[in-house]
Image (spheres, coloured by chain):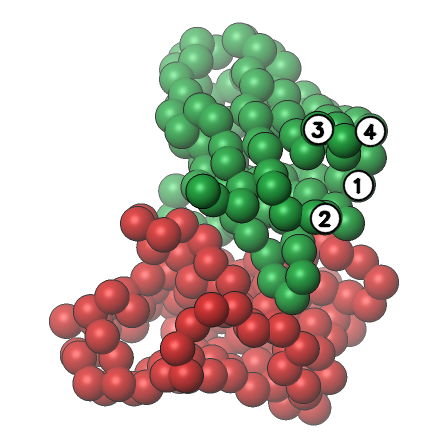
Chain colours: A green, B red
């Protein structure tokens, strides 16, 4: 079993749809990160969460520490949101990564 | 501020060779972490350096090594390359007191 599980693996949405990506983890954490990776490889850190909810533009990230679960929501999705979204959990001496959710937003 | 830079961006090597990749962190950042990304395994943590010392290490064989210089620039070295070492190698830097990491564009290594 992976320490960090993401779902779904692939997601196709129509422009404007509300999108949710889920992340469950089994390792203890101090903070959970959501990363965005566009084709070509560049990774951007979207959020770092240790509790509650954070919002940045159309992106909202929530975390439930007791249930060891986090969600990333995208409101009013746009084709430029097409990317791979990865959750990452620091634990012990290293980071554990989910396998990523590949999102395609169709115009 | 300039972002994290990595050189080279692309590299082709043959089995048995060794390779050195370079990472320059954001000015003022003293922590540099390295990651390997492959289609099969996804992102995996290699190691982290802080103030020229390896602070954390992932589960990779001894063929993977790294170092950090006094200006915080870091290099990673892979010796005796194997086909399975073909991957995107990413480095990320962060400043003291924060977990937010800033990623470089990566070096895509192909081993033939």
Which chain letter goes with mark 4?
Answer: A
Which chain letter goes with mark 3?
Answer: A
Looking at the picture, how far across and down is residue B94, in whole percent? 71, 64
Q: Nearer the viewer, residue A65 or A7?
A: A65
For the C terminus of chain A, the image quarter is top left
Looking at the picture, how far across and down is residue B13, in whole percent? 22, 77
Whether tag 1 and tag 2 are in contact, CB under 8 A, the answer is: yes
Foreground: disc 4 or disc 3? 3
Foreground: disc 2 or disc 4? 2
Q: Is residue B9 left or right of residue A49?
A: left
On the image, numbered disc 2 is attached to which residue?
A29
Q: Is residue A89 above or below residue B10?
A: above
Q: Say which element carries label 3.
A: loop
Looking at the picture, how far across and down is residue A42, in whole percent? 48, 51
Q: Is residue B8 left or right of residue A46?
A: left
Foreground: disc 1 or disc 2? 2
On the image, numbered disc 1 is attached to which residue?
A50
Q: Residue at position x 63%, y 82% from top?
A: B54
On the image, numbered disc 3 is attached to which residue?
A67
Q: Say which element carries label 2.
A: loop
Q: Residues within 10 Å of mark 3 (few under 14, many from 20)?
A: few
On the image, numbered disc 4 is attached to which residue?
A52
Q: Residues within 10 Å of mark 2 (few under 14, many from 20)?
A: some
Both labels 3 and 2 in a single chain: yes
């Amino acid at each position: 079993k992976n320490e960090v599980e993401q779902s779904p693996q692939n997601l196709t949405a129509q422009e404007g749809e509300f999108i949710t990506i889920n992340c469950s983890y089994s390792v203890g954490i101090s903070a959970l990160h959501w990363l965005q990776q566009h084709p070509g490889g560049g990774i951007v850190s979207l959020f770092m969460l240790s509790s509650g909810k954070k919002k940045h533009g159309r992106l909202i990230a929530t975390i439930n520490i007791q249930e060891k679960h986090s969600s990333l929501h995208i409101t009013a999705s746009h084709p430029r949101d097409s990317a791979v979204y990865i959750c990452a959990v620091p634990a012990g001496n290293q980071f554990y990564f989910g396998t990523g959710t590949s999102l395609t937003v169709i115009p | 501020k300039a972002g994290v830079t990595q050189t080279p961006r692309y590299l082709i090597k043959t089995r048995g060779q060794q390779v050195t990749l370079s990472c320059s962190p954001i000015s003022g950042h003293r922590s540099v972490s390295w990651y390997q990304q492959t289609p099969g395994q996804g992102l995996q943590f290699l190691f982290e350096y802080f103030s020229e010392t390896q602070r954390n290490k992932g589960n990779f064989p001894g063929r993977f090594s790294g170092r950090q210089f006094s200006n915080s620039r870091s290099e990673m070295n892979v010796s005796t390359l194997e086909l399975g070492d073909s991957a995107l190698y990413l480095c990320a830097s962060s400043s003291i007191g924060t977990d937010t990491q800033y990623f470089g564009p990566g070096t895509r290594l192909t081993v033939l």
